[in-house]
């Protein structure tokens, strides 16, 4: 039997997302901000976040997969959809739903870094620290947990639960 234990309520998510958007809007004032979202997990987070951002912003998506139906990383991420937008000399903010081992984001920072952005920073809805293998700075984060498998608000388990409006700990 699986169990869903509440981690972040709707109001908490909205408040954290709005305050993060405020910080981003201030930090990138006067710059050419390009948000690069990592599909699919970040789609709900990004759609809420960008509606609170008050500076001009361009948005594109990239898709990589590191998970089959398991709950731990398979190592080297697989590129499913490349970035289409030109990020040369742009300020890039790379956004994922959750950082676990860090392999996905560190791979993508390197990958996008080769395309000549002016700056590249990292944002995640959740920073999950216990299994981190690649150490790097997560510039913007909404929520920190040590461990556990989270679902809802875009996060899935075997493609399920993405539509839940709140974030839950999935207990197996
Ligand atoms: P990493 O490469 O190990 O940091 O894994 C990052 C990716 O694994 C994220 O983009 C998620 O898609 C997925 N992931 C890691 N932990 C969880 C979780 O607790 N719930 C849902 N997806 C997760
Ligand atoms: Mg993901």
Image (spheres, grey):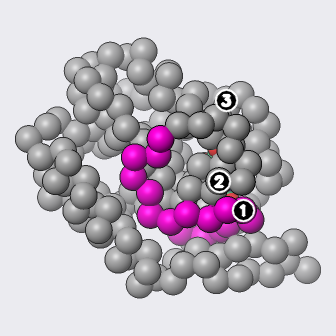
Q: Position of residue 79 (x, y in %)?
A: 61, 28
Answer few, some or many: residues within 10 Å of disc 3's Cα (few below 14, many 20 plus, some between 14 and 19).
few
Q: Which residues are magenta?
A: 137-154
Closer to the chain start, of discs 3 and 2, is: 3
Check disc 3 and report the residue beneath it. 78
The residue at the point 38 percent across, 27 percent down is: 84
Check disc 1 and report the residue beneath it. 147
The residue at the point 27 percent across, 38 percent down is: 34
**SS state under label 3:** strand
As drawn, 51 above or below 115: below
The answer to whether residue 113 is left or right of residue 156 is left
Q: Which mark is residue 24?
A: none
Q: Which quadrant does the C terminus fall into?
A: bottom right
Q: Which quadrant does the N terminus fall into?
A: bottom right
Residue 95 seen in render = no
Q: In the image shown, does 117 or 40 lie closer to the viewer?
A: 117
Q: Are the residues flagged by discs 2 and 1 in contact, CB closer than 8 Å? A: yes
**SS state under label 2:** loop
Q: Position of residue 76 (x, y in %)?
A: 71, 28
């Amino acid at each position: 039997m699986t169990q869903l234990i509440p981690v972040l309520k709707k109001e908490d998510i909205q408040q954290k997302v709005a305050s993060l958007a405020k910080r981003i809007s201030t930090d990138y004032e006067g710059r050419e901000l390009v948000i690069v979202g990592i599909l699919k997990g970040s789609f709900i987070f990004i759609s809420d976040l960008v509606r609170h951002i008050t500076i001009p912003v361009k948005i594109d998506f990239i898709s990589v997969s590191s998970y089959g139906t398991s709950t731990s990383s398979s190592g080297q991420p697989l590129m499913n959809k490349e970035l289409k937008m030109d990020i040369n000399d742009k300020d890039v903010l790379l956004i994922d739903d959750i950082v676990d081992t860090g392999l996905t984001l560190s791979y993508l920072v390197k990958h996008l870094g080769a395309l000549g952005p002016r700056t590249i920073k990292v944002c995640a809805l959740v920073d999950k620290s216990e299994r981190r293998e690649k150490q790097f700075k997560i510039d913007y984060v909404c929520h920190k947990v040590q461990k556990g498998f989270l679902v809802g608000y875009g996060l899935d388990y075997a493609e399920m639960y993405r539509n839940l409006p709140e974030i839950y700990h999935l207990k197996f």
